[in-house]
Amino acid sequence: MAALALALAILAAYSNAAQAGTRSIGDTTILAAVPYPGHPGGIAIDGNTAYVDTFNPVDRAADDYDAIFTYDLASGTLRSDRPNPIKVPRMMSPTPMGLAAIALDAQGLMYVADMNGRILRLDPATGDQSEYATFPTNSMTSFTAMPDGIAFDGQGNLYVTDGSAPVIWRVPPGGGEAKPWLIDPALPSAWASGLDGAAIDPSGTYLYFTEGYVSGTGVYRVPLDNPSIAEVQLVHLYGPPPPVFSSDDSELHGIFGVSAIAFGSSGKLYVTLMGANQVSVLRPDGSEEGRFPDLQNPGPYDDPLFPALDGHGYLLITNLAIRAPEKSAVLRAWVNDKGLPLVRPPIP
């Protein structure tokens, strides 16, 4: 039995090596189309299942729901053994925004950022949903908090970036009202160019987050045990992307520095750059290793938004496709890197 296990392990290693040798970093295919309402945003992987929510309501502001789709990763098809999609009633209609990042807990429940000012908790097997966290302001008040990126720490605290203000919120284990955790007026936020991605680093020491500067993007980190302005560190700064002269998309590409992040088990950080229509790969020291796709050959990329690694060497990316809903899809790019497991604490 031990000899058989060793033989299978060697065979798997050779298979993985051969697979890596036949692909180039960034080689991309379409894993799955995202049906109406399209415009996929957040994505989370749970074993052989991918959860994908809907982000952008610009062309359907009067709809009364957003959606969360459940995909089988092996086939790219929608699972039929559960409610699919899960429809999430909106806080109000019309409403300015949709859903964003997704986190998971130890029980397999989903936590979803609703950019109108709340965090939802959902059971993906039944579709049951409840309000997990609220914010002092939301889309029904004069000023709005716009939850965007979310990440748990090992103690069950949920960190939430704000797409409309230079604030990172923290929700205590079990939920409730979010409290400001870090406020940094040096991070100039504005609608569609605020704080976006959030991820705990491999050491569990830092919260990494991204900040849009209208046309550029910065990646920062701050110690979890010392969330002070003085401790905020710049990891990498991206300049504005080249101007786009096509009248079809010039109003969007090259304008918004929207981005999100995911760590690989290698320690590399994968950063989506919506304005540049690319994915950047940062080394653990913050230097840039490379980008894909080539700007001259973007392939299926159209507003790449949230990334997640599937554990088999691929980076999955939601294709937001703001102006082309027919391109709404989940992309699969070969990066030869397994995902850093999400922090999934038990939540009461």
Image (cartoon, grey):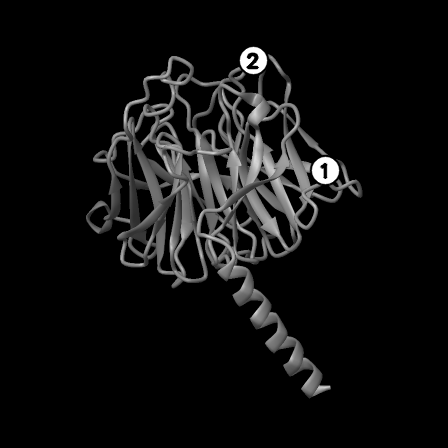
Look at the picture and state if 192 lies above or below 221: above
Q: Please state the horizontal and vertical placement of residue 82, each as a whole percent of the image.
A: 77, 41
Task: Name the quadrant containing residue 296.
Answer: top left
Look at the picture and state if 312 lies above or below 279: below
Q: Is residue 72 left or right of residue 203?
A: right
- Residue found 61% across the figure and 70% down from its top: 12
Amino acid type of the residue tagged 2 in the rendering: Pro
Look at the picture and state if 319 lies above or below 126: above
Viewer-nearest residue: 145 or 6 = 6
The CA span between labels 2 and 1 is 23 Å
Amino acid type of the residue tagged 1 in the rendering: Gly
Q: Earlier in the sequence, mark 2 or mark 1?
A: 2
Q: Is residue 159 left or right of residue 254?
A: right
- Residue found 57% across the figure and 72% down from its top: 13
Q: Residues within 10 Å of mark 1 (few under 14, many from 20)?
A: some
- Residue beneath disc 1: 127
Instruction: Residue at the far front: name it.
Output: 22
In which quadrant is the N terminus drawn?
A: bottom right
- Residue beneath disc 2: 94
Task: Name the quadrant containing residue 194.
Answer: top left
Q: Please state the horizontal and vertical placement of residue 267, each as a whole percent of the image.
A: 39, 60
Q: Are marks 2 and 1 in contact (CB under 8 Å)?
A: no
SS for dot 2: loop
SS for dot 1: loop
